């Protein structure tokens, strides 16, 4: 099985992934790193750093889209991408499931409250090359924007709570850091 991580913030990209134990080659500036995600123990600090970097990149990407009506669906798209990049059969299965569920809920919220006078929009960052959303985004109707953003904040809070409740002794610190990174996305919805 292969998964590709493309973090925007850290500059470190993971090239390939196999199962138990997982050895991953990553290249940055001509230096080769090997990240081992153990099969029996909880994931490595480098893997966690990549995951946190991907969540931060999601926030930064959506933050650069100036149209507030696209924020909820942008977060949905980005969280889905982060969830899809977490490999199956690792200690991050629960995280992947929570992120995928959160993404689906945000996407449904945006679709149900879309601005019917506007078409879908494919967003990208100017000057960043082909990096963009994986699908066209639904703009939220202006009359619904405040209520939709409040509901989206609740969805992110629910995801944070699920992460913290599903943590056990061996992964408590990592889940808390992931929950904190996910919570930082709420700032987009409160502005």
Image (spheres, rainbow, N blue to C red):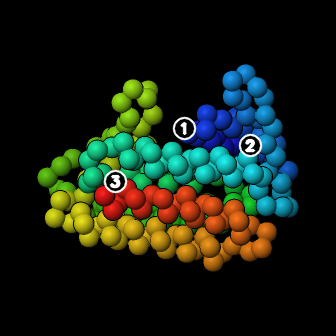
Whole-number angstrom distance, CA of label 3 to CA of label 1: 18 Å
Report whether residue 49 is seen.
yes
Q: Is mark 3 on a helix, strand or loop?
A: helix
Residue 17: % across, % down: 74, 43
Instruction: Please identify the quadrant where the N terminus is shown.
Output: top right
Residue at (79% x, 61% y) in the render: 42
Q: Which of marks 2 and 3 is nearer the N terminus?
A: 2
> How many numbered marks does the figure carry?
3
- In the displayed structure, 147 sits above or below 60; it is below
Q: What element carries label 1?
A: loop
Q: Residue 71 carries which label?
A: 3
Q: Which of marks 1 and 2 is nearer the N terminus?
A: 1
Residue 3: % across, % down: 66, 44
Whole-number angstrom distance, CA of label 2 to CA of label 3: 31 Å
Residue at (38% x, 47% y) in the render: 63
To which residue does mark 2 refer? Answer: 17
Q: Is residue 134 left or right of residue 181?
A: left
To which residue does mark 1 refer? Answer: 8
Whole-number angstrom distance, CA of label 1 to CA of label 2: 19 Å
């Amino acid at each position: 099985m292969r998964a590709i991580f493309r973090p925007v913030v850290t500059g470190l990209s993971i090239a390939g992934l196999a199962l138990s134990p997982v050895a991953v080659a990553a290249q940055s500036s001509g230096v080769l790193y090997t990240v081992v995600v153990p099969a029996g123990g909880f994931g490595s600090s480098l893997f966690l750093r990549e995951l946190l970097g991907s969540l931060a990149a999601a926030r930064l990407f959506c933050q650069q889209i100036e149209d507030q009506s696209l924020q909820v669906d942008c977060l949905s798209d980005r969280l889905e991408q982060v969830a899809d990049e977490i490999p199956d059969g690792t200690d991050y299965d629960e995280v992947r499931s929570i992120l995928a569920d959160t993404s689906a809920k945000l996407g449904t919220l945006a679709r149900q409250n879309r601005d019917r006078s506007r078409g879908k929009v494919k967003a990208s960052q100017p000057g960043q090359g082909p990096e963009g959303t994986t699908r066209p985004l639904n703009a939220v109707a202006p009359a619904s924007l405040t209520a939709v953003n409040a509901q989206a904040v609740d969805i992110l809070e629910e995801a944070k709570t699920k992460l913290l409740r599903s943590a056990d002794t061996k992964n408590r610190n990592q889940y808390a850091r992931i929950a904190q990174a996910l919570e930082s996305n709420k700032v987009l919805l409160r502005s």
